[in-house]
Image (cartoon, grey):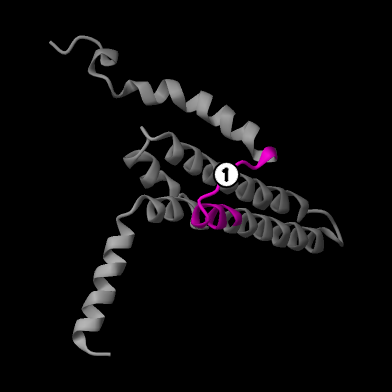
Amino acid sequence: MNTTQIKDKLQKIKAYLVTDEAAKIFAVLPLYFSWVPVYSWKRNIPEFVTVCLYSAVNTCLFLLGLLFAQVVSVLPFVGLYFAATIHLLSILLYLGIAGFLIYSIRLKKTIEIPVLLDWVKMLQAFIAPIAQLDRVSDYGSEG
């Protein structure tokens, strides 16, 4: 490859990284709280809110699995084996949901996981009043 081909490839990569699809994929990557920056930048767009909240629920499920594995690990004799199994299952669930979300985004499909949809709607209802605090009038008189 010569330098012009490398520059063209880098330009294409840079152009892709600023697209909405790349932002959605970054939000659902299986990295802890990678959804937070995307949510804070694009919280006015409903697509991004839904994707970010699915990723948030996924992260919470994984952390709950780790907590449950920690609690189970204190059982005598078989606790460590059960904890290791629960930890493995929570990792596989975390990566599976993240992979499904990335797959759905790449194919431009609507994302609806029926089991998680109730939790996403509950999180939306919880976050909606907090998101309205952007307005200056909600902070009281400004002098």
Left or right side of 134 for 72: right
Decide: is 139 above or below 1: above
Instruction: Give the number of marks.
Output: 1
Give whichever of 120, 81 is nearer the camera: 120
Q: Residues within 10 Å of mark 1 (few under 14, many from 20)?
A: some
Give whichever of 72, 95 is nearer the camera: 95
Is residue 101 on the magenta stretch?
A: yes
Q: Secondary structure at mark 1?
A: loop
- Percent across and percent down for residue 88 are 71, 62
- Percent across and percent down for residue 67 are 66, 48
- Percent across and percent down for residue 17 are 32, 60
Q: Residue furthest left?
A: 143
Is residue 107 on the magenta stretch?
A: yes
**Which residue is rendered at x = 46% and y = 49% of the image?**
33
Q: Residue furthest bottom?
A: 1
The quadrant of the rendering that contains the C terminus is top left
Q: Quadrant of residue 18?
A: bottom left
**Which residue is rendered at x = 63% and y = 35% of the image?**
117
Q: Which residue is mark 1?
A: 111
The quadrant of the rendering that contains the N terminus is bottom left
In this picture, which residue range is highlighted in magenta? 100-114
Amino acid tagged 1 = Ile
Q: Residue furthest right?
A: 77
Decide: is 124 above or below 93: above
Give whichever of 19, 133 is nearer the camera: 19
- Percent across and percent down for residue 120 are 57, 34
**Which residue is rendered at x = 36% and y = 50% of the image?**
20
